[in-house]
Image: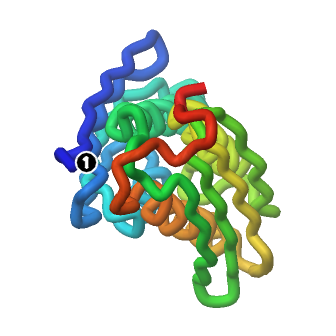
Amino acid sequence: MTARTATVTRATRETSITVTLTLEGAGQADVKTGLGFLDHLLEALSRHARFDVTLACKGDLHVDDHHTAEDCALAFGQAVDRALGERRGVNRFGWAYAPLDEALARAVVDLSGRSYADVTLGLRREAIGGLACENIPHILRSLAAAGRFTLHVDVLKGENDHHRAEAAFKATALALKQAVACSGFDDVPSTKGTLDA
């Protein structure tokens, strides 16, 4: 299988983003969004999925953190989608549990070509490190929407919201790593013969 890599540029009046992603990587990440906790979550996603990612964003943080958080997730997801191509020879499905101290998260992925996300994190704080907690599940939903995959994420337990959020991203990373991995077959893993619709 050839190297699966993609570069996405997204420019609006709210954000300017460039992301380069390689699926067969070592988990090296260089993420600069202007939001420390968003950098941390995307770096954890890259590291544990073993994607090499470079992402730079200049966003309208003087307005709010929402546009930066959403648009970075959309660009990241679009890069995953482009790197997957027609999704030939992938496992398609992935699932994982990830603990972080007292927190435990579960994620399940289907590279179905159809966007759907059910994300329940149960965060209680207003914000973590300048990132509104309401945006954290939205990041995962936006990632799945642009990546054209189904994603279910639940945080099953945990007291610390930082731990709950990070565990959710780590579980998502591990599930994605499994789903995008090469199956050893050269077919599209679907009874329809396509994962494009």
Q: Is residue 34 above or below residue 124?
A: above
**Picture quadrant where residue 21 is located:** top left
- If the image is split into quadrants, where does the C terminus sit? top right
Residue 14 location, x and y as percent? 48, 17
Tag 1 residue: 22
Q: Nearer the viewer, residue 82 or 91?
A: 91
Residue at 54% x, 38% y: name it. 69
Q: Nearer the viewer, residue 164 or 155?
A: 155
Q: Is residue 20 above or below residue 158?
A: above
Q: Residues within 10 Å of mark 1 (few under 14, many from 20)?
A: many
Residue at 42% x, 52% y: name it. 90
**Picture quadrant where residue 141 is located:** top right
Q: Can residue 132 be seen by looking at this rendering? A: no
Q: Amino acid at mark 1?
A: Thr
Q: Can residue 100 be seen by looking at this rendering? A: yes
Q: What count of labels does the image hold?
A: 1
Answer with left or right where residue 91 lies relative to residue 163: left
Residue at 47% x, 58% y: name it. 91
Residue at 42% x, 40% y: name it. 87
Residue 133 location, x and y as percent? 69, 52
Q: Nearer the viewer, residue 26 or 121?
A: 26
Can you name the residue that lies furthest to the left here?
Answer: 2
